[in-house]
Amino acid sequence: MSDTPKIEVSRRGFLKSAGLTAATTVLDTATALAQDAHQAASHGAAVGPDAVPIKLHVNGQDHAVTVEPRYTLAETLRDHLNLTGTKVVCDRGSCSACTLWIDGTPELACMTLAVDAVGRKITTIEGLSHGEQLHPLQAAFIKHDAMQCGFCTPGMVMSCAALLKRNANPSLADVKHAVSGNLCRCGTYPKVFDATLDAAKHGTMSSHLLNLNPAKEG
Amino acid sequence: MNRFAFANCTTVDQALSELKDGAVLKAGGIDLLDLMKEGIVSPPRLVNIRNIGELRGITSGPDGLHIKPLSTLSEISEHSEIRRDYSALADAAGHAATPQVRNMATIGGNITQRPRCWYFRSSDFDCKKKGGSSRECHAHDGENQYHAVMNNGTCASVHPSSTAVPLLAMNARVEIASKRGKRTVKISDFYVAPEKDVINETVLQPDEIITEIFVPKPETGTRSAYQKYGEKESFDWPLADAGVVLVMDGDKCRRASVVLGVAAPTPIRANRAEEALAGATISEATARAAAKAAMQNATPLSQNGYKVQLFQTAIYRTILLAAGQIDRDPSAVG
């Protein structure tokens, strides 16, 4: 293999396995109807049980969507907004595969109702990269091969990226603590730790990380 | 999940008005959504209190600690004054569940969460805690390795809240509001034994909201600790846990509170351990003797005798940790 991996190809492979769909699809812009429902929901009037139009702020953009109050944020992102990077595994808050950021804090999409996420800033795995530019942690996950089946990966990345946002120079114990809720049955933890510590060391140089040859780094 | 209406409230008064006809409160939603997804509860309406500003915030004053019920476990575990003056509470909040759950779960929800007993949590069993017809507790003759080792005659579920353990050891009080007015309940009276009420674990009525949890200022010389022991290093309810508050005079203990969490259907004070420690010099020997005394009246079931020993270990090591004689036990979990 060449010393310089084909970035496009490996990236595509990574996207496929980790479910990192480049989320450029913005559904309908917020409608007046959604605004009304939002306001009703904010001022005590009950909505539902029938589907209710709401507006979700996801990855910097407003999305209008109509869901029953019983729909979780995870279901709504995946089934209505086609943002399938957020994975649902246990659907009980036990595995953290659905970890995303709400107002910058790692929370669980499976235990959040979509109607309860109105007015909050939601960041999913799709919102972590800037167009073609991967987040340094995503690049580090590729470099360190920090995934196998990939189901836990988006949640792992969101947990570790939140840690790096809070603490630019984490210790191994900090990383372990950050992913202490993220279950990986393939056992990729050591590589997740390596990737996160490496990303911390290399800061924002994601393309630089991608071009490094892991074998040479030892 | 069943279909339901969703009422988003921004004031306590608004929430109290919505809280009728089978409606239930939703704060962090962690325990409630779990129960709904399992079909254990199917409320027609959720009253969302998560956006009520007056139910948020932690203040530490000369009289003690005022914790509003929407404070998350993360906020409590990271609060500098709680870590310094109420460390057992910070320990318990910081070692519950996962980082993500701690970011969402509120203290109000944590102290009112329903038991984890698998017969209760499975819709296949007509457990009497769910109003079912079965007169016997299924755990008595069933799989009971995680069940109660004390006060387990009527219902053998264990109380799941870890923060309730230090709150009981610190004589916390719960302030409750309803349309009828406000009332304050000592946390020791907040929890109800299954012999009194097999269905509800607390005195909280369906039309009531917790508006504050108050912890009195500890006396000078007070030290506290909480540790839990379990099967997994993270995200698991404990198999044994202990919360210890010691009022120290040098090496001598003037007064002790020792509370056990998952020993019984409600968090319980280990009176015999407290008596053994009062006036004693804290050492490994006195800590072990207190731990043994605490478990003297244990009534383990067919598969959980090991918990009696595990509790003794949890108790004596947490006494020594509270006294500052050992570091946090590396075999403790969370």
Image (cartoon, coloured by chain):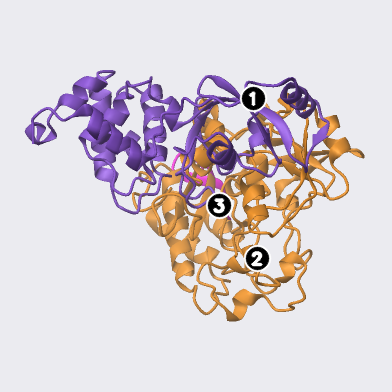
Chain colours: A purple, B orange
Q: Nearer the viewer, residue B10 or B216?
A: B10
Left or right: residue B47 compared with residue B304 = right
Left or right: residue B127 compared with residue A26 = right
Q: Is residue A159 above or below residue B276?
A: above
- State whether discs 2 and 1 lie on one chain: yes
Task: Report in which chain the residue with disc 2 lies.
Answer: B
Magenta stretch containing residue B75, yes or no? no
Q: Position of residue A99 (x, y in %)?
A: 47, 38
Q: Is residue B56 above or below residue B101?
A: above
Q: Position of residue B246 (x, y in %)?
A: 53, 44
Amino acid on which the number 3 mark rests in the picture: Ala
Q: Earlier in the sequence, mark 3 or mark 2?
A: 2
Whether residue B205 is visible: yes
Residue located at (41% from left, 35% from top) = A159
Mark carried by residue B59: 1
Give the residue at mark 2: B120
Q: Position of residue B174 (x, y in %)?
A: 74, 41
Whether residue B171 is visible: no
Q: CA distance from mark 3 to mark 1?
A: 31 Å
* Residue B300 picture quarter: bottom right
CB under 8 Å between discs 2 and 1: no
Q: Earlier in the sequence, mark 2 or mark 1?
A: 1
Q: Crowding near pointer 2: few (<14 within 10 Å), some, many (20+)? A: many
Secondary structure mostly taken by the magenta-highlighted segment of the chain: strand
The residue mark sitting in front, 2 or 1, is 2
Q: CA distance from mark 3 to mark 2?
A: 38 Å
Secondary structure state at the residue bearing disc 2:
helix
Mark carried by residue B278: 3
Secondary structure state at the residue bearing disc 3:
loop
Q: Nearer the viewer, residue B309 or A102?
A: A102
Amino acid on which the number 1 mark rests in the picture: Thr
Q: Which residues are magenta?
A: B246-259
